[in-house]
Image (cartoon, grey):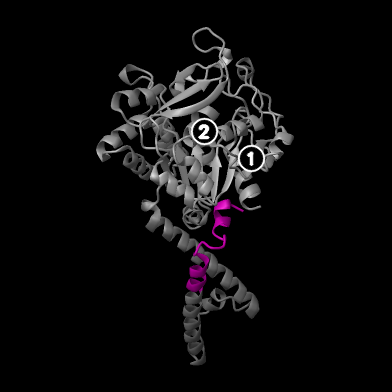
Amino acid sequence: MNPRVVRWFTPGLHVKRWLVLLMVGMVLISLGIGYALANVYRSGLHLPYIFYYLTLQFLDRYVRGALFAALGLSIILFALYKLTQSVLGPFLPGRDRALSEIIYNYRFLQKGPRVVALGGGTGLSTLLRGLKKYTGNLTAIVTVADDGGSSGRLRAEYRILPPGDFRQCITALADVEPLMTTLFQHRFKEGSLNGHSFGNLFIMAMAEITGDFEHAIRESGRVLAVRGQIVPSTLRDVTLIAEMADGQTRVGESSIPHPNGDDGNGAVATAIKRVFLEPEPTINPEAEEAILNAEMIVVGPGSLYTSILPNLVVDGMAEALKASPAIKVFVCNVATQPGETDAFRVSDHLKAIEGHMGTNIFDFVVVNSNNNFPLPPSAQTAGIKRVVYDPATVNQRSIHAVLVDVVNSRISTHHDPDKLARAIMKKIWRS
């Protein structure tokens, strides 16, 4: 059966009860007409002979009743379907979407758990793309340390928070036609706009119109019918700084990871010891409120030192996470990142976070269990490897490891949005 038809029978849509009431009204009207016709027959008035066939008098009474009931129900449902298309069609956001889907999203996703996701870049948008199918109560807390590419240029020239990661979150949570999402991600390739994405320019323009970056993100989300909310981890203009194991310091998010063991100056790169933000920022009150009210907090996937930790080292973030009664989940990357997490195991990711926060805050860690998809040759050449699960070290932290297939079959270095969301919502939240 068509999934769109099946969706109408999902409990809690507040539709079937009114259909039943409508049919009760139809039955009462039918009874009235039946009584009137019965009185006509009793009066001795002879109706044209064709009524004998129209009312199926040649069939058994119960067979007639069943046939007329089925025909009547079919006509009512068809008429209601066409009526809703005619009346509501012009107001639906996305004419290719079924009304049943829109009602389902409105009724059920608003009843979903309050989930906060922390991170940035591709990892966070991947997570959000899957989670939005389970709950509408999503809050994405996004790092503001990005200083590369289009975001870095706009940030330096206009002194706004970097829009790139916010753009990716908006498109991941958007509930509009695919063309609009594609437009927001479109990147110009020529002229003075070369390298800029349309979404970044849109957010920048919205910031000038609304007066500040927060309102710009909120209004951009409204335009694209975002399912949930997106907030920066801090409202300060900050710079990410990394202290390396050999004592050197790297300034700026884009200068920290150096693949293939090269620090950018021809020397061999060393491991990252810790990262911090300057000037020292305080947590965005809106982000703090979301964390304290959350039922589940998900950290990762994403670049450990340049997407995840820049959120966690914000002043007040660690305290808010520890104080929150929510279930706390860490999603470990499926592959290492050259120049940032070379040869890192699952426990190494956890150890790095503990080193910055002072303690383990997680109840669960999601680990990919499917290594059947080989890494592409380009990834192997770059030194990318699968993140190894070391159970003994993980179990020492009193953290529950959830081993599940979450790898993307097309891009085997990334998570699959649907697999990841299913693992979190069905193996952790509903367990």
Relative horizontal placement of residue 372, taking residue 118 as reference (left or right): right
What's the mark number on residue 365? 1
Relative horizontal placement of residue 3, taking residue 289 as reference (left or right): right
* Residue at point 35%, 22% (across, down): 153
Disc 1 on helix, strand or loop? strand
* Residue at point 55%, 48% (across, down): 296
- Residue 391 lies in the magenta stretch: no
Res. 123 in view: yes
- Residue 14 lies in the magenta stretch: yes
User: Based on the displayed image, in which of its 4 quarters is residue 385 positioned?
Assistant: top right
Query: Label 1 is placed on what type of residue?
Result: Val
Dot 2 corresponds to which residue?
308
Circles 2 and 1 in contact, beta carbons < 8 Å: no
User: Based on the displayed image, in which of its 4 quarters is residue 147 positioned?
Assistant: top left
Disc 2 on helix, strand or loop? helix
Where residue 163 appears, as percent x and y from the top left, is 38, 32
The relative height of residue 43 versus residue 2 in the rendered view (above or below) is: below
The residue furthest top is 266
The residue furthest right is 392
What's the mark number on residue 198? none
Res. 97 in view: no
Query: Label 2 is placed on what type of residue?
Result: Ile
* Residue at point 64%, 75% (across, down): 63
Span colored in magenta: 1-23
Q: Is 125 or 234 nearer to us in this picture? A: 234
Relative horizontal placement of residue 7, taking residue 370 as reference (left or right): left
Q: Residues within 10 Å of mark 2 (few under 14, many from 20)?
A: many
Among the two numbered marks 2 and 1 on one chain, the one whose residue lies closer to the N terminus: 2
The relative height of residue 86 versus residue 94 in the rendered view (above or below) is: below
Q: Is 224 or 143 nearer to us in this picture? A: 143
Where residue 317 appears, as percent x and y from the top left, is 47, 41
Q: How many circles with numbers are drawn on the protein?
A: 2
